[in-house]
Image (tube, rainbow, N blue to C red):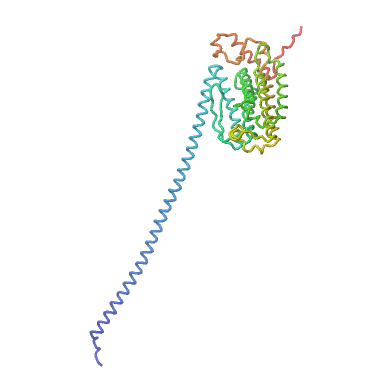
Amino acid sequence: MSEPREPSALERLRRLEEDDLARRKGRLVDEGAGTAGASKSDSRRRGVVGGTVAGLVLLLLKGKSLLVLLASKGLLLLSALSKLWVTLGTMGASVLFYSGFYGWKFAFGLVVLILVHELGHGVAAKLLGLKVGAPIFIPGFGAVIALKGQPRSTWASAIVGYGGPLAGTLGGLAVLCFGHLFFDAGLALALAHFTFLLNFFNLVPVGGLDGDHISEPFERVHWGTGLAFTGLIAALTATGEETRPGGTNPQMLFLVAILVLGIVKAIRVHRRVVAAASGDQGRLVDRLTGPRAGYTQEATVEPGQRRAAALAYFGLIGLLAWLAGYSEPPSRKETPNVRATSFLPPGSAFDRATGSASASEGRVQLGRDRLEFALGRRRQVAPSGD
């Protein structure tokens, strides 16, 4: 048996090459597996980091949106508070101003009732979708509320104008019926009477007052019928017991002003109708900048709306004329030495200026008489039987 032959040098070289090649292949396989594992691990890490970054970015965006929302809400709150402070501040100034003449109780009640009037305008404007500002009081001149959006028709203007006197009249009625539960009897009645007069004055159809805006939609027939009714109310007021010789009846003055200025407005309406019938459209500058230039939706106003505005206007005139007379008792005519400021409290500026204690007592008694008259509870003295 022959011994195994030793490989030749060439065979050993080939075997070494094969071993080397096998080792290199094994190393490549191991390196490939490691690289795949590392890439998967890196992908996971990148996914986690990317998700974290995306979450942080989203959180920052949401936080920024939240901050913007909070900032906007805060600005709106600050704006509302600033408007509130302006209203309250001017109200306080008005109370101080009127207190020097009428005493603080009457002044406070008067300012609150003026606020009710202005809020009536604001509510009416809101119902029409118009933006309004906060009421601003002007001591000695009442208050104003600014419209940020203008009415597009005379009907809308009439609604906004009517809201103030209507709310003011309702406020005066509330004080007339229930004011004695919170104030002195004479003071409550005086507040109601003065409120009726203020709202009556606002119905005068002249520029700047509510009556001018309410009467914008009227046609000739509305003015004719309404002024005839107003003349009848004026005649009844002139013969009423609240009108005394040598005295001044504010209701009568307002009725005369409504009659005179109403006739002027009726003539203007007549001229406008005649001009439109003849094809005369008037001057271009008047159509573009005149008082009716902003009524771009005037064609949509229906005849029933114009009729309703006239009925509401002249009806409120009659109601306020009656309420002002109803809250003014005959005792005013019986005490001519006590002037229209008879509702002033004792010790007011009027008393200090005149030094009249008897006038102060007369005003207190007159206040009681007014309340009894307004509530229909004037005491009757029963005859004594012998």
Residue 51 % position (x, y): 42, 55
Q: Is residue 1 left or right of residue 210?
A: left
Residue 377 % position (x, y): 69, 18
On screen, residue 259 above or below 295? above
- Which quarter shows the N terminus? bottom left
Q: Is residue 356 left or right of residue 328?
A: left
Residue 174 % position (x, y): 64, 25
- Relative depth, front residue between 147 and 358: 147
On screen, residue 237 above or below 217? above
On screen, residue 109 above or below 28? above
- Which quarter shows the C terminus? top right
Figure quadrant of residue 317: top right
On screen, residue 1 above or below 305? below
Residue 152 % position (x, y): 61, 36
- Relative depth, front residue between 380 and 61: 61
Q: Is residue 18 left or right of residue 49?
A: left
